[in-house]
Image (tube, coloured by chain):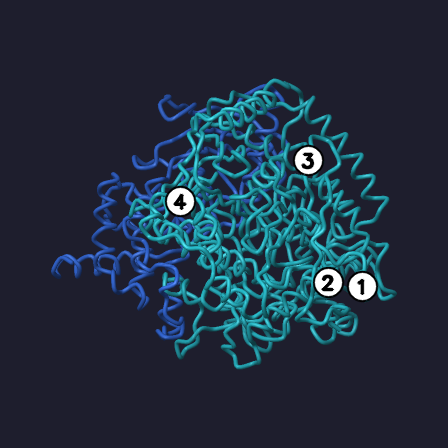
Chain colours: A blue, B cyan
């Protein structure tokens, strides 16, 4: 199949970006989206042109490297899908595909389709952990954890940290990301001890890093490649409110 | 006397580690803050090692090439993590886990190391659980377990099919906590370019900042490599596309010996190659073999749809050949059996290079809901890639390059032959012999990271408390940086016509054809010639756009491919040298009448540790003889 590509090109973080148009006429419907971009780059390099910088690694929708905004959707067409799982059979012959990086103040573009998601690491450092050193752990069966709570905690923990939620949000809010981590740990007995501190600190850090506020549009849930639901945002709000009303630790 | 000494503590097997810990040298808490540690890699070995060493009070600098520590490829491990907890009351024990690994590794691993990993396995589950890792639970709230290949007990802990992700995020969160406390400093988007050795000891690394292109020098008292495996040598593999063997090769060139480089696991259950553009093969977890049955049609070239083929016309070849273990034979055995069927014309699909993994019986017996609960995400992943629904149609699978049992040679301290340079997790060779059992890579990586390296690194650092961190202006750093820069400049100066990826693909083809699932003398010799030619072509016709002073993904690829080419020669050399079959290393000259791997214990019961002798020179072989004092060495049978 033949494709027209409209791709964001930006030399570095300081440069002004623009859309570049490319044409590719050797696309196979069985190719993955990433392989299509690989073939574009191989072609560009051989023509002595600059390839398009984009990030990808595991190709199994688990590392969270992909950060492509395809035809107005983070990770492109399909629900609960990361870019690496998109195949060209999802597009029509002759179609124009527009590819952009995540766009959010807290995720500055580094080059072309690559963004800096270091802000997520900073959010995690603000409280996305249980304070326990190696060697201090009690027996894993000492705290019984019901299957329902364990499964629910897992659903939240499935977040791959890709940032699609931020890219999808009109406010560029990281609330779903924070909600997933706060909920996972608040659902488990081992995370309850620091639950209040965690909710307060992670929310404060989110504001500090320039992420916007949540206005409950649900765009994050709709675009999350792991199907993480906004019920976790409700859980986060509850955790945050309870923590705000209780005495500071 | 050989140059290599495994430094295995004296005494009975079960007491070695206890005795080591009781008598090792310690560093007092107030001295630890004077000591700097570099950890390269943030997977299931690196992140816990960095976090644990920081918790103890050392100053830790952590490096990864990804944008975040959370993206290390351990994240993609699916099925589970073993622990000898006997949760199922089915006769499991530390000795049993140890025995299974020694046997699974086809008696080519070091007893003392394997026993130690089994010994700390239970503690790992405690630690991860305490960090908030949501392992699967029974309704009563206790840990749930599943079974993996090559064993007869249920000892695998799991978090659906995303165990690696959950386990890795446990280590990552511990690391982030240390970053917040200021004890660990994170350097992401940094590619390691060399190890710096001063007065015979590892004292730092040279890196390239992948955003600015700047070359950086980092000094420390010790360096820990947790840089993973090199299965991407085949180009198409189950690994992340950026996984590489470069750090190991840099260490090798600086004098660290490379152990059993040819021991590479080919994983039996992967989605087959679908087209020529493919950049990666996707693993379908071994846990699927708990409920899926592997088969091909009995009639050669049967082109009917799988559901139209009645049971009596199907060949459940693993159940037929290995009745005791059936579909749960170890990976090397399952891979070769699938290849044998396909090579003889019984393969299925467009290419004939695939077999079925069928859930029909499991769905009928247990119901779709139960199967979905166990494997839902894997079935979804399969459907997204192939467009077929495994609840209704059998999966098509074929073996693919996966895990490298080989790696940097380390002693009992996990230290390489360069003093002060440690290698942990998949980056070392130590625990899996010639074949790794399922769910033991997370186990070994986490064991090294949480509970072994923190002790053995301390033991080393105890003698360094009066040593100052060397200046990064010292001649060794300057020289290492100049050499690293020269190589990068050389890549750019070639200005040829072929891309790094095209060379990688060709290398992968050679390796898969001649140094993959089956190997023989003629093929390996042919591979040597082909790789040598490819190397010449690479260094004379490579094309790289852009410059070194910016984000340049092609430059990153080229430096990985350059190392892969040298590593490929090392692998082929090792495979040629070992004229026996053992585990994943199958030499066609050495098999039984039934076509099973045949070891030659009187000649090859050793670890091959290769020492670098210079560019394009034959490496020198050192042998670490393996002594089996606690198991009976016998023919590995899963019949």
The label nearer to you, 4 versus 3, is: 4
Q: Is residue B229 left or right of residue B569?
A: left
Q: List the residue tagged with mark 3.
A: B565
Please check whether the numbered discs 4 and 2 fall on a single chain: yes
Q: Report the front residue among B382 and B30.
A: B30
Please determine whether, in this image, residue B110 is positioned above or below residue A94: below
Q: List the residue tagged with mark 4.
A: B465
Mark before the other along the chain sequence, 1 or 3:
3
Please determine whether, in this image, residue B436 is positioned above or below residue A119: below
Q: Quadrant of residue A130?
A: bottom left
Question: Mark 2 packing: few (<14 Cα in 10 Å), some, or many (20+)?
Answer: many
Residue contact between numbered discs 3 and 2, judged by CB atoms under 8 Å: no
Please check whether the numbered discs 1 and 3 fall on a single chain: yes
Residue contact between numbered discs 1 and 2, judged by CB atoms under 8 Å: yes
SS category of the residue bearing label 3: helix
Distance from Cα at disc 4 to Cα at disc 2: 49 Å
Q: Is residue B431 left or right of residue B457?
A: right
Mark before the other along the chain sequence, 4 or 1:
4
SS category of the residue bearing label 1: loop
Q: List the residue tagged with mark 1.
A: B596
Q: Chain of mark 4?
A: B
Q: List the residue tagged with mark 2.
A: B333
Distance from Cα at disc 3 to Cα at disc 2: 28 Å
């Amino acid at each position: 199949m033949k494709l027209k590509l409209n791709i964001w090109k930006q030399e570095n973080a300081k440069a002004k970006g623009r859309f570049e148009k490319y044409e590719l006429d050797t696309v196979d419907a069985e190719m993955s989206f990433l392989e299509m971009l690989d073939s574009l780059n191989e072609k560009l390099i051989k023509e002595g042109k600059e390839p398009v910088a984009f990030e990808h690694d595991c190709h199994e929708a688990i590392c969270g490297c992909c950060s492509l905004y395809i035809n107005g959707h983070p990770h492109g067409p399909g629900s609960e899908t990361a870019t690496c799982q998109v195949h060209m059979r999802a597009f029509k012959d002759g179609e124009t595909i527009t590819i952009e990086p995540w766009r959010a103040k807290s995720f500055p573009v580094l080059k072309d389709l690559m963004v800096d998601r270091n802000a997520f690491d900073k959010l995690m450092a603000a409280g996305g952990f249980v304070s326990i050193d190696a060697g201090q752990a009690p027996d894993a069966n000492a705290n019984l954890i019901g299957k329902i709570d364990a499964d629910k905690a897992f659903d939240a923990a499935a977040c791959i940290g890709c940032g699609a939620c931020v890219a999808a949000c009109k406010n560029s809010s990281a609330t779903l990301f924070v909600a997933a981590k706060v909920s996972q740990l608040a659902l488990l007995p081992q995370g309850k001890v620091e639950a209040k501190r965690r909710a307060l600190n992670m929310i404060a850090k989110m504001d500090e890093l320039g992420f916007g506020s949540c206005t409950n549009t649900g765009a994050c849930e709709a675009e999350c490649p792991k199907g993480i639901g906004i019920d976790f945002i409700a859980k986060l709000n509850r955790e945050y409110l309870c923590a705000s009303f209780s005495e500071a630790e | 006397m050989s140059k290599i000494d495994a430094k295995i503590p004296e005494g009975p097997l079960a007491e070695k580690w206890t005795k080591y810990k009781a008598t090792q040298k310690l560093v007092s808490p107030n001295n630890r803050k004077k000591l700097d540690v570099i950890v390269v890699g943030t997977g299931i070995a690196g992140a816990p090692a960095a976090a644990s060493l920081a918790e103890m009070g050392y100053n830790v600098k952590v490096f990864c090439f990804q944008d975040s520590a959370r993206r290390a490829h351990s994240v993609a491990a699916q099925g589970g993590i073993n622990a000898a907890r006997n949760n199922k009351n089915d006769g499991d024990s530390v000795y049993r886990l140890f025995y299974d690994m020694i046997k699974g590794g086809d008696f080519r691993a070091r007893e003392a190391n394997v026993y130690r990993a089994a010994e700390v396995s239970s503690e790992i589950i405690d630690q991860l659980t305490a960090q908030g890792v949501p392992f699967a639970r029974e309704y009563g709230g206790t840990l749930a377990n599943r079974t993996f290949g090559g064993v007869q007990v249920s000892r695998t802990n799991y978090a659906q099919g995303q165990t690696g992700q959950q386990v890795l995020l446990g280590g990552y969160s511990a690391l982030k906590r240390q970053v917040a406390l200021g004890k660990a400093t994170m350097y992401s988007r940094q590619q390691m370019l060399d190890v710096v050795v001063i007065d015979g000891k590892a004292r730092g690394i040279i890196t390239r900042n992948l955003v600015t292109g700047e070359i950086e020098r980092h000094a420390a008292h010790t360096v820990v490599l947790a840089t993973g495996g090199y299965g991407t040598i085949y180009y198409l593999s189950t690994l992340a596309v950026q996984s590489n063997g470069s750090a190991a090769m840099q260490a090798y060139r600086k004098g660290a010996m490379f152990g059993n480089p040819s021991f590479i696991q080919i994983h039996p259950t992967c989605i087959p190659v679908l087209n020529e553009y493919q950049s990666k093969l996707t693993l379908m977890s071994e846990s699927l073999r708990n409920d899926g049955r592997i088969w091909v049609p009995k009639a050669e070239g049967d082109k009917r749809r799988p559901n139209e083929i009645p049971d009596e016309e199907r060949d459940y070849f693993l159940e037929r050949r290995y009745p005791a273990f059936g579909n749960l034979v170890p990976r090397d055995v399952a891979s070769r059996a699938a290849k044998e069927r396909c090579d003889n014309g019984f393969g299925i699909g467009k290419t004939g290079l695939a077999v079925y993994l069928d859930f029909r019986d499991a769905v009928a017996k247990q119901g779709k809901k139960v199967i979905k609960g166990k494997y839902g995400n894997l079935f979804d992943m399969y459907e997204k890639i192939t467009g077929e629904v495994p609840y209704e149609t059998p999966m098509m699978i074929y073996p693919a390059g996966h895990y490298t049992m080989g790696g940097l040679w380390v002693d009992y301290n996990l230290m390489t032959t360069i003093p002060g340079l440690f290698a942990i997790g998949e980056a070392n060779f130590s625990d899996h012999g010639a074949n790794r059992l399922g769910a033991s890579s997370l186990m070994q990586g986490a064991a090294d990271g949480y509970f072994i390296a923190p002790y053995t690194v301390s033991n080393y650092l105890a003698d360094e408390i009066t040593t100052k961190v060397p200046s990064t202006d010292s001649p060794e750093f300057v020289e290492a940086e100049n050499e690293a820069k020269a190589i990068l400049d050389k890549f750019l100066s070639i200005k040829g016509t072929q891309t790094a990826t095209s060379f990688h693909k060709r290398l992968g083809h050679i390796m898969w054809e001649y140094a993959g699932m089956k190997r023989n003398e003629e093929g390996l010799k042919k591979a040597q010639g082909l790789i040598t030619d490819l190397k010449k072509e690479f260094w004379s016709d490579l094309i790289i756009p852009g410059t070194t002073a910016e984000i340049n993904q092609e430059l990153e690829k080229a430096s990985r491919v350059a190392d892969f080419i040298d590593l490929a020669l090392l692998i082929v050399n090792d495979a040629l040298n070992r004229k026996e079959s053992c585990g994943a290393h199958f030499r066609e000259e050495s098999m039984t009448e039934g076509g099973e791997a045949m070891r030659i214990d009187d000649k090859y019961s050793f670890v091959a540790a290769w020492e670098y002798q210079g560019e394009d020179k034959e490496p020198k072989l050192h042998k670490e003889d393996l002594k089996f004092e606690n198991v009976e060495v016998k023919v590995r049978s899963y019949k």
